[in-house]
Image: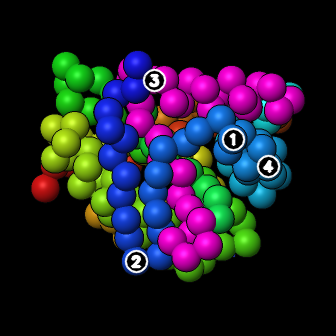
Amino acid sequence: MPLFDPFPVLHTPRLHLRAPCLADAPDFHRHDTDLQVRRYLSRPPPSSLAVTEAKVAGMVDNTDAVAWVLADATTGAFLGYACLWHWDQLNARAELGYVLDPARWGQGLVPEALTPILQFGFERMSLHAIEAWVHPDNHASIRVLAKLGFIKESHFREHELNLNTHSWDDVLVYTLLRP
Ligand SMILES: CC(C)(COP(=O)(O)OP(=O)(O)OC[C@H]1O[C@@H](n2cnc3c(N)ncnc32)[C@H](O)[C@@H]1OP(=O)(O)O)[C@@H](O)C(=O)NCCC(=O)NCCS
């Protein structure tokens, strides 16, 4: 059962933020197996398209997360995705996630996409806080969060086992409180 029915389609000047569907699985898979995209992620890439298809099916039918495909507003091309997940309804908190096609990095597209997503989280999901977990070396992601007003709240040392490097990664937690 999807969390929101109808799905909350959002628009920005350059993007159409729509519901994921199973036909998007090859695009998700291309992003999720891209070495540049995965550089600061601690989990291995999906081992097959079938694994990604299962992930996309889980996104469509999820009770604690809502995910948007970031599509080019003009061409409809799949550019990436963003989500509010780990929705803790008791404490009115959720976690933000985002991924963009490396060919479109540095154009301000993710801050543009996240602006209505954050507004949706605070207004429609009644969130009190939205947080993001980031690798300390992921400067592009930290810049995105700074542009949106997130504040660094924690630096957890050796908090996440990196299954790619078999070492322990530090994790920074950035938070935006309800305006
Ligand atoms: C993090 C990410 C979403 C940023 O999206 P974006 O739309 O490029 O964001 P912006 O255009 O606002 O750029 C943010 C910063 O990225 C850096 N950047 C710009 N062009 C870049 C490029 N070609 N390559 C790497 N970093 C670049 C700059 O520091 C920029 O800051 P600035 O605008 O002050 O110069 C994108 O880099 C990405 O998908 N990364 C891989 C997935 C990921 O790490 N997700 C976050 C997990 S916490």
Relative to 140, is 87 on the left or the right?
Answer: left
The crowding category of the residue bearing disc 3, from other C-alpha atoms within 10 Å (few below 14, some 14 to 19, many at least 20), is some
* SS at circle 2: loop
Vertical placement of residue 81 versus 157, above or below? below
Residue 90: image location, x then y, percent: 19, 19
Q: Earlier in the sequence, mark 1 or mark 3?
A: 1
Q: Earlier in the sequence, mark 3 or mark 4?
A: 4
The crowding category of the residue bearing disc 1, from other C-alpha atoms within 10 Å (few below 14, some 14 to 19, many at least 20), is few
Q: Which mark is residue 13?
A: 2
**Residue 32 can be seen in this image:** no
Would you name the residue on which mark 4 appears?
30
Residue type, label 2: Pro
Residue type, label 4: Arg
**Residue 147 can be seen in this image:** yes
Q: Which mark is residue 62?
A: 3
How many marks on residues?
A: 4
Relative to 31, is 88 on the left or the right?
Answer: left
Residue type, label 1: Ala
Image coloring type: rainbow
